[in-house]
Image (cartoon, rainbow, N blue to C red):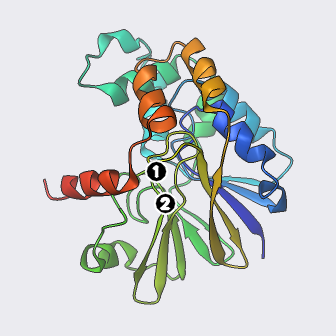
Amino acid sequence: MSVVAALYDVHGNLPALDAVLADEAFARADAVLVGGDVAAGPLPAEVLDRLAALALPVHWVRGNADREVVAHFDRGDTDHSIYGPDAPAERADAFTAGRITRAHRDLLAGFEEVVRLDGALYCHGSPRSDEEIITALTPEARLAPMLAGVREALVVCGHTHHQFELRAGAQRVVNAGAVGMPYEGAPGAYWLLVADGEPDLRRTIYDVDAAASALRASGFPDVEDVIRESLIEPVEAAFVARHFEERTRI
């Protein structure tokens, strides 16, 4: 079985990605699984180029932001300034679409909804939707229907930017965390190593002050919010879990 490094929610944070790629634990991997929402952020082209150039096999899962970036690119919607303060996702997607090439767009468009690898299923939100929300607080009664028809014992997801493990019957659901935009209450790049079917949640420490300077230089809209909430004063995982879980009741 492969040793898989699952890298989710990089969100164009190249310094965080580079830190993970330089982590000695990453050197154990013989395959990489990119779990979606990889580009939407400050340095999208650089992140995609870095991952595409890896000597290891790379498997790509589509995230909701990847899908939206492609849509923005295709309609020429690349002016982030037209979106107001109540539309941060649209601003990020438009900015990203304006800073990638056709080759990057085609790479994003080719991502798969789910990837099955060595007895594990990798998805972004849930096995049935790249936008469905799973949190550390998701009850089994809400989780179980998302796993209907899934044969794999291990399901790896992302989307909500905090690491956790849940169980639904005999199945384990593990959130790999976020490399580039984590909500964990402590700075770092959060990711997952899967060896012999066993998930190992990882955190890589890196120089967030230097990273903040690089992200600011990109001109990314709302960059100060990203730096504050994910790098300098990271939002607590418990708060994020409650916030996202409440959204499922709206």
Residue pointed to by mark 1: 184
Left or right placement of residue 58 versus residue 100 in this view: right
Looking at the rendered image, the quarter that the N terminus falls into is bottom right
Residue farthest right in this picture:
55
Give the mark nearer the N terminus: 2 vs 1. 2
Residue 119, placed above or below residue 229: below
Q: Position of residue 231 (x, y in %)?
A: 51, 35
Q: Nearer the viewer, residue 47 or 74?
A: 47
Q: Position of residue 71 (x, y in %)?
A: 43, 30
Whether residue 142 is visible to the viewer of this picture, yes or no, is yes
Count of numbered labels shown in the rendering: 2
The residue at 60%/74% (across/down) is 120
- The amino acid type, in three-letter code, at marker 2 is Gln
Residue 209, placed above or below residue 51: above
Q: Position of residue 108 (x, y in %)?
A: 58, 38
Hey, which quadrant is residue 121 in on the image?
A: bottom right
Whether residues under marks 2 and 1 lie with C-beta atoms below 8 angstroms apart, the answer is yes
Residue farthest bottom in this picture:
170
Left or right placement of residue 155 versus residue 147 in this view: right
The residue at 21%/52% (across/down) is 247
Whether residue 103 is visible to the viewer of this picture, yes or no, is no
Residue pointed to by mark 2: 163
Which numbered marker is on residue 146? none
Kindly state the secondary structure of the residue where label 1 is placed.
loop
Left or right placement of residue 137 versus residue 173 in this view: left
C-alpha span from label 2 to label 1 = 8 Å
- The amino acid type, in three-letter code, at marker 1 is Glu
Residue 80, placed above or below residue 188: above
